[in-house]
Image (tube, rainbow, N blue to C red):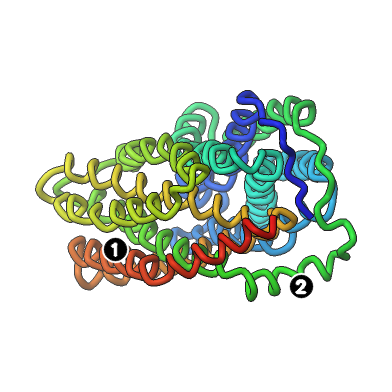
Amino acid sequence: MNVQPSARISPSLVWLFAIASGLSVANVYYAQPLLDALARDFGISQAAVGGVITATQLGCALALLFLVPLGDRVDRRRLMAIQMVALIVALIAAGMAQSAPVLLAGMLAVGLLGTAMTQGLIAYAASAAAPHEQGRVVGTAQGGVFIGLLLARVFAGGISDLAGWRGVYFCAALLMLAIAIPLWRRLPVLPPASRTLSYPRLLASMLTLLRDEKVLQVRGMLALLMFAAFNIFWSALVLPLSAPPYSFSHTAIGAFGLAGMVGALAAARAGEWADRGYARRTSGIALLALVLAWWPLSLMEVSLWALAIGIVLLDLGGQALHVTNQSLIFRTRPDAHSRLVGLYMLFYAVGSGLGAIGTTVTYAHFGWQGVCLLGAVVSLLALVFWWLTQRQVAETMDCATERR
């Protein structure tokens, strides 16, 4: 059942989707620069405080499997409202935690509901957009996600300096409350795409989608490799920059991430290209940028300007590919947007985990040059995989267009 409207979505609503998505995803990443303060306040060892991030990421995975797919079965507007209220409560609970178990439970809930809101809004935007503008709308919303992710660490660091780590979560709750009112007023009412499916059948249908949808399989694998490359870089960057001769602070290291804002700005344009039928060309250019980025990144020890250029290329290629992937996946099954985005982001989660594990081991044995070589190999593998599968995916997309 095609539930997409034919009317053009207003620019103000597109920006509302982007802002709400950015604020939602930021909640998942506030804890990263606060680990030292959390370890001190709760008496958690430096080795064990990483469990805070683990709890948050566990919540993310549970959301992708069990909450995000609900958008295909129930009233999305009502679902967003319920999740928003629950997320505000979770943020307040995390900020008021007085023991480590309560803190971990709060972080798990923040990861669960923050991810459900973020990916639910992306699927909502895709369903609210007309087919000819779907890529542009998804690209803009995804740009909001990327900016929210980048600024989350800066926001958390600044607020914690003024009001402590608890103030970060109380401020986050206020921000979500502020965006909740315009969301409730402006979000369009869309009919559930799969109302007849029971919840168990809805979850079971995700396996069917993963088995049958060739575009999801190919684009998901590209996402896995691309996000693995991302995390190979970002998980290792702090190691050389925090050591001599640089000895940069965490704030200074985080500032390098702001160079990736260029990638977020390019994300919407990649969606527009996909709308115009240039998805294959955009994917090729994005993957080529991803491969080329590792050359200036490998020159970091010679020039920090080369590092900045490499970050721009890495994020530009990665975000353009990410938006193109989502644009193509959403076109295959208009009745399954929420399930599709949940499955697609599971590929992202696996790739991110593998990249983070691989890069720390590589850096320990082969240093920064080994990290760059590993990233380049993974990026090149993604380019080769795309080249070998592009014709098959193009034929699948043609068939999907004919069905619609």
- Residue 141 visible in the displayed image: yes
Residue drawn at x 48%, y 68% as measured from the top left: 221
Instruction: Please rate how many residues cluster around mark 2, counting C-alpha atoms within 10 Å: few if below 14, some from 14 to 19, many from 20.
Output: few
Query: What percent of the width, then of the height, locates residue 96?
Result: 69, 41
The residue under the point 48% across, 70% down is 392
* Residue beneath disc 2: 204
Residue 290: quarter of image: bottom left
Residue receiving disc 1? 375
Image position of 10 with respect to 245: above or below: above
Find residue 108 and report its horizontal and vertical position in percent. Answer: 66, 56
Asked which secondary structure carries label 2, the reply is helix
Q: Pick out the residue farthest to the front.
A: 402
Q: Residue at x 29, y 63 (%)?
A: 375
* Amino acid marked by disc 1: Gly
Quadrant of image for the N terminus: bottom right
Q: Nearer the viewer, residue 89 or 66?
A: 66
Relative image position of residue 10 (x, y in whole percent): 65, 26
Decide which of 97, 306 is in the foreground and name it.
306
Q: Quadrant of the C terminus?
A: bottom right
Q: Is residue 312 left or right of residue 62?
A: left
Front residue of 334/371: it is 334
Q: Kindly state the secondary structure of the residue where label 1 is placed.
A: helix
Figure quadrant of residue 43: bottom right
**What crowding class fits label 1: few (fewer than 14 Cα within 10 Å), some (14-19), or many (20 or more)?**
many
Q: Amino acid at mark 2?
A: Ala
Q: Is residue 119 left or right of residue 284?
A: right
